[in-house]
Amino acid sequence: MTASDFRVTLLGTGVPIPSPDRFGPCTLVEAGDQKFLIDAGRGATIRLYQLNLPIGRIDVQLLTHYHSDHTSGVPDVWLTGWLESYFGTRNTPYRVIGPNGARELIENLERAYARDIKIRVADEKLPLSGIATDVTEFDRDGPVYEKNGVKVIAFEVDHGDVIKPCYGYRFEYGGRVAVFSSDTRYNHNVIKYGAGADLLVHEVASARPELMREAYVQRIIGHHTTPRVAGLVFAQTKPKLAVYTHIVLLGSECIPPPTLDDIVAETRQTYDGPLAVGEDLMVFEIGETVSVRQLQPSSPFHSSASPA
């Protein structure tokens, strides 16, 4: 195995706020010749296009939970990946794996887009095999996928008392491990499944103390992990590289949001190991070490970047 056999690319590191810099939550995992998407938020297909990766080439769509910012790009990946073009042309079923609720989501999308599908089949002669779906649901921790040396394990996380189900994923390939927390508060499952990972990709949320007086801000932060607490997770799991994604920085008209430097400084209160603050199109090559490079939208293959 070479380093390039196992690669993680952050396609979207943002939140529900429509930002041109941070698209909706979405991560691409490439292991050997297999390609996976974890969630598909706003703009997922645009980022795939910027990578020059055919949308129809995605083998498996994994879902963590059913907040709209994590699923709004699902119909775009499904439908656009079917079109007859170099960026599409999927002729096998769109495979989806997610916690209970995945089948309901996909079946409702099939109903919503039934007229579009009917028209394209009649007009463009697109294969029905490429718009078909293959959905697998699960309701507990454990393996959810295993093929050609790639093993994916789902583990439940804690995104809030009523935001259920919500799961993270652990990828095992070639003796290397990449773990993705999904949206979560401090959770022992992240520590259990993330222990000793080569790459641990974790969410983070922060607001300045003066804004924390607001009830709605308390509610949002209460559903996520603050930098200081995330640092505790990293200190206990000891990954080769810890990475932030789904970066929630709350502010108001009068109180600015924390900066990325603030996030790093607070994390350093509890964790002194390797850390990178994710950006859209940041790539991690997982081998003996984890290397980092930042791609630019206008030039898919760009210079390297170093972890913070």
Image (cartoon, helix red, strand yellow):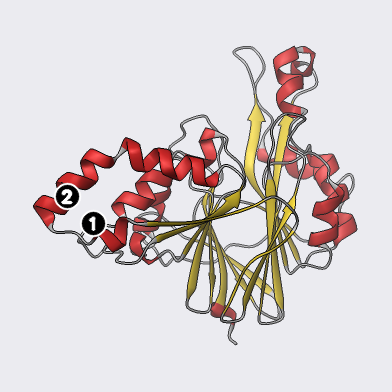
Position of residue 243 relative to residue 300, above or below, is: above
- In this view, the residue in front, 147 or 132, is 132
Task: Name which residue lies at 69% across and 36% down.
Answer: 164
Task: Name which residue lies at 34% across and 66% down.
Answer: 92
- Provide the residue designation for mark 1: 83
CA distance separating discs 2 and 1 = 9 Å
Asked if disc 2 and disc 1 are in contact, CB closer than 8 Å, the reply is: yes
Q: Residue 3 appears at what percent x and percent y?
A: 59, 80
Instruction: Please identify the quadrant where the N terminus is shown.
Output: bottom right
Q: Residue 78 appears at what percent x and percent y?
A: 36, 52
Any part of residue 202 in sight: yes
Give left or right: position of 27 versus 181: left
Task: Name which residue lies at 41% across and 53% down.
Answer: 47
Element type where label 2 sits in the image: helix
Element type where label 1 sits in the image: loop
Q: Residues within 10 Å of mark 1 (few under 14, many from 20)?
A: many
Lower sequence index among marks 2 and 1: 1
Q: Residue furthest left?
A: 123
Image quarter of residue 14: top right
- Provide the residue designation for mark 2: 120
Q: Residue furthest bottom?
A: 1
Q: Amino acid at mark 2?
A: Arg
- In this view, the residue in front, 280 or 140, is 140
Task: Name which residue lies at 51% across and 29% down.
Answer: 17
Position of residue 161 relative to residue 151, above or below, is: above
**Mark 2 vs mark 1: in front:** 2
Q: Amino acid at mark 1?
A: Leu
